Image (cartoon, coloured by chain):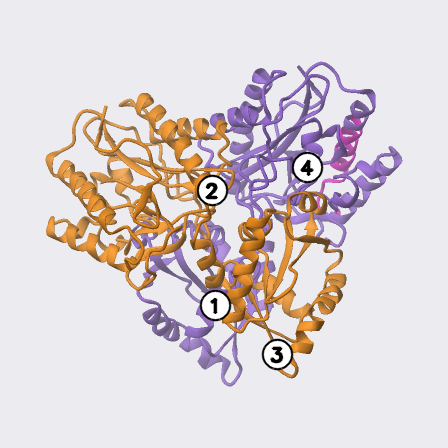
Chain colours: A purple, B orange
Amino acid sequence: MKEYAKRIERLQERLRQQALDGCMITQNVDLYYFTGSMQTGYLFVPSGGEAVFFVRRSVVRAQDESAVAVEPLGSFRAFGQRLAEVFAPLFRQAGSRKLRVAAEFDVLPVQQLQRLEAVLPDVEWADGSTVIRELRMIKSAAELALIRESARVIDLAFQEAFGMLRAGMTELELISGFELFIRRQGHIGLMRMRGYNQEVITGMVGAGEAAAMPSYFDGPAGGQGLSAASPQSASRRVIQSGEPILLDVGCCIDGYVIDQTRTAVIGSLPEDLAQAYDTSERIIRSVEEMLKPGTVCEKLYMHSLLMAHEAGLSDHYMGYGADQVKFLGHGIGLEIDELPVLAKGFSYPLQPGMVVAIEPKFTFPQRGVVGIENSYAITDTGFEKLTVTREGLIKL
Amino acid sequence: MKEYAKRIERLQERLRQQALDGCMITQNVDLYYFTGSMQTGYLFVPSGGEAVFFVRRSVVRAQDESAVAVEPLGSFRAFGQRLAEVFAPLFRQAGSRKLRVAAEFDVLPVQQLQRLEAVLPDVEWADGSTVIRELRMIKSAAELALIRESARVIDLAFQEAFGMLRAGMTELELISGFELFIRRQGHIGLMRMRGYNQEVITGMVGAGEAAAMPSYFDGPAGGQGLSAASPQSASRRVIQSGEPILLDVGCCIDGYVIDQTRTAVIGSLPEDLAQAYDTSERIIRSVEEMLKPGTVCEKLYMHSLLMAHEAGLSDHYMGYGADQVKFLGHGIGLEIDELPVLAKGFSYPLQPGMVVAIEPKFTFPQRGVVGIENSYAITDTGFEKLTVTREGLIKL
């Protein structure tokens, strides 16, 4: 309970800094972060005083789970009247000034905002996405423990997959083996992602040219997918000897995700791809040396870009041609696209409690993708590598 | 290609009827419906003339997949300039009147709308959700064929599950068996849902009191789930003899979902639950008689409500107490929460091409949920039952 009280307090501090009178939280993951409950409703956090979680359903479940006081939402009209009461002291304080209330504009559908505007016509709505995402960027000890648990489970799944991988099996068979294993260990069935239109079940398994296909997915290697109706991740392509097999698979245990990648081959890789794989490991080793409080996020990306350039692999780095992505890594936690982003323009200095997945990869059109990805927690003095799976090109 | 041209034409007709000058489509499922491609971008459909799909990534994939002309999106500023060109004839036509352009306000995040408003300051944005959802409500022959294929696969999975079900196994083990089977058959890994914050992987498997737990999920039986971080669907509860086991599991093959429920028991059910199950079958038989063009959707729900009342089961119908849901069924297609909804206030008359999942269920707190769910296509003269799995209480 203390954990959640602290989260609310930190949010209130930020609201006051930004001259916001409150924040109305509605997204399931943010609700869970601040209350411990993912039931449907509206969490109102004033810039000072008690937060209230107005719950549509299930009220019973929310009362059981939530660290914040729960009130049944009732009808939307009744909700409006109740909000007017809750907001009355804020209005009195504000005087003639309009109240400014933040909401999660990065995920909140327009219709939902319009409903809020209708019940609270005298409020000016502001975008609270960054405030919330920045708070969630720094993980508590309890959160780190949960990510470690996901890392433990996914390592067992990778070991299982290495044992099961055979030439002649399809990418889909391989990923469904992964999925069965992690599901039985408590994987919730998907990895939550905040980005609009982005879907991740368990990541991707891609071999040869299927892995190298460009995709809509906002990452260096989305994969071919099953059809135009699911155009990323594993396909029905048969895995062959002598080609790179990219295993970019994670899981979500008790809400928290781990994200990691290993490259495998049955037999051996062509020399240039093997060298590119080695470069990805050299990059991640070199980046690790910079992983400590104070390093500015974009420096990590720029550094990796330079190393890829020096290895003569600029054109292949993090995708190919028009489909290259412009980052080296991303925060993970309850979602797999959290802050900080390791990319140009992200000037956050690393801080203890940040958790980042770092994924230098090289794409060779028609041939495949090689690379490595580990997740790290930033500590007071450097980093803790959360990914425990063995490194190196996995030769089977 | 003709299929997609027809969809665009029908959309344009609706836009003209509603005095809209165009529609800007961004959601992945809607993009796929109108173009055949799910790549990331903006599909602009003017009320007359050529539609253009402005693609961020992957342009190559979109060019390969899309039935609509593809243009690379480029930078957002370049996109604004290009849009100004595309909109120029519409502006000329409009004269001093503001252009009215629709977008999917039910799913579009506020930030995304704000970006569009910034590049097109002279446009008045309108909610196009209902226009699009009403078009998608009527399925083509090609769409029906895909839903039949999903129905075929899920039937095989149910047969497999009936064979595998044992007292002593957990709900999670059972659903992961289902999931492995359908995944290998090409299930995309999740069942897409339009509703804000709603997540469905493959539905739920719930036994005894775990199935009867209220949940945030917008359906009659969400299930207990794995933890507060995933508070619906299967749990780690052990399945026992003599209790109802609700199998509400679907799959999504090549984009189209099927949704169905069967009730199983190891041994036999207490008399009152067995009778409630029979009532659910009586309701679905009786509702089938009304499944033909012209029947108003809400009448189906009201009729089922009356039958539940006459059976003395009002309090248990479609959930219990404050957590009852107020519908009998819902449209399915690319998403599992499509129109029409079989609920009060939905005055759509049934039409050929509609596909609905009908799910009368009874919840007994602490004891479990019983019921049945079939998916149906409305035909010219009545219905086609798409669900092919055997009915009746499944006794194991």
Nearer mark to the viewer, of 4 and 2: 2
Judge the density around disc 3: few (<14), some (14-19), many (≥20) Cα neighbours within 10 Å: some
Q: Amino acid at mark 2?
A: Tyr
Judge the density around disc 4: few (<14), some (14-19), many (≥20) Cα neighbours within 10 Å: many
**Same chain letter for marks 3 and 4:** no
Q: Position of residue B161 (x, y in %)?
A: 34, 26
Q: Residue at x 52, y 33 (%)?
A: A150
Write down the residue under mark 1.
Answer: A48
- Please report, as a chain letter, where disc 2 is located: B
Lower sequence index among marks 3 and 2: 3
- Please report, as a chain letter, where disc 3 is located: B
Write down the residue under mark 3.
Answer: B98
**Same chain letter for marks 4 and 2:** no
Examine the structure image and report whether residue B54 is included in the region drawn in magenta.
Answer: no
Q: Amino acid at mark 4?
A: Ala
| Residues in magenta, as a range | A278-296
Examine the structure image and report whether residue A293 is included in the region drawn in magenta.
Answer: yes
Helix, strand or loop at label 2? It is: strand
Q: Position of residue A384 (x, y in %)?
A: 64, 35
Write down the residue under mark 4.
Answer: A221
